[in-house]
Amino acid sequence: MSTLHIFDMDGTLVRGSACLDISRHLGQIERVNEIEQAWSRGEVGHVAFYELCLPLWEGLTEADVDLVFAAGEWIAGVPAVFADIATRGEYSAVITLSPQFYADRLLAWGAGSVHGAEVYGGIPPIPEQVMTPESKIDVATALMTRYDLGPDDVIAYGDSASDIPLFEHLPKTVAINGSDSARSAATITYEGSDLRDAYALAREHFIERPCAAAAD
């Protein structure tokens, strides 16, 4: 049986958030930081977040997104981990609340699939196309069906409260530089700056050790 590795993006693969980085590039960081803080306090919902942000991103171009992505503070080893997963015949996916148009750049780094909010600068969001923490479960379930896998065949990696619903849904989870709540919800935790180390820890704990025990 194969394994599906599901990665959060903001805070897990990249420090900070795509929305803040985009807004900084466009000179809108102060306003969007206020919106994001209100969202983190539960004062602004997921759809309302984009209703407030997207007008500030009007005129955002593909070239802008390329620049923001390239300047992101990415954890080391992301392409190497995607490559190793593919070489083993396993599957990788990134599920994020951030815009699909930003996260799609991870496909060039080897991500098997990418799933984010279908939103666009200057265009009002369609509520059904905005991702929520609960949406991550729906996407994960669809991926399991696609690859004929069950919950025991999935490892989820995340860092914050938005990952907790998925962590509670799956038995194999890794908090990477996680918040207190994410660490409490995760099966194992990793603190550091290299995804290869977090991935190796997950393989040892969830794949190699159980296989060795079964062989005994």
Image: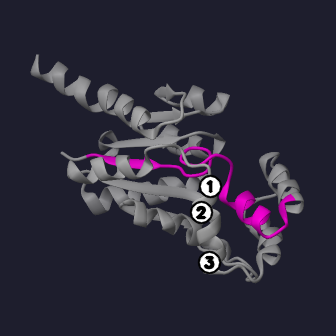
Instruction: Provide the secondary structure element on which disc 1 rests.
Output: loop
* Left or right of 114 on screen, residue 52: right
Quadrant (top left, top right, bottom left, bottom right) of the C terminus: top left
Give the residue at mark 2: 69
Q: Amino acid at mark 2?
A: Phe
User: Of the residues under marks 3 and 1, which one precedes in the sequence?
Assistant: 3
Locate residue 119, reporting x and y percent.
65, 75
The reply to whether the C-beta atoms of the residues labelled 3 and 1 are less than 8 Å apart is no
**Where residue 43 sits in the image (x, y, percent)?**
85, 52
The tag on residue 72 is: 1
Question: Quick one: label 3 or label 2, which is nearer the N terminus?
Answer: 3
Dot 3 corresponds to which residue?
A: 63
Left or right: 145 in relation to 172 = left
Q: Which numbered tag is attached to residue 62?
A: none
Amino acid on which disc 3 is placed: Ala
Compared across the picture, whether 199 is left or right of 11 comes to left
> What residue is rendered at 84% in x and 67% in y?
27
Above or below, comparing residue 168 to residue 187 in the picture: below
Task: Give the spatial CA distance, label 2 vs label 1.
Answer: 5 Å
Against 27, residue 216 (above or below) is above
Do the residues under discs 3 and 2 have CB atoms within 8 angstroms? no
Q: Residue furthest top?
A: 216
Closer-to-camera residue (117/14)? 14
The answer to whether the residue labelled 2 contacts the one labelled 1, judged by CB atoms less than 8 Å apart, is yes
Tell me if mark 3 has few (under 14), some (14-19) or many (20+) residues whose alpha carbon lies within 10 angstroms of its own: few
Q: Is residue 12 magenta?
A: yes
Residues 115 and 45: in front is 115
What span is in magenta? Answer: 3-29
Q: How many marks?
A: 3
SS type, badge 3:
helix
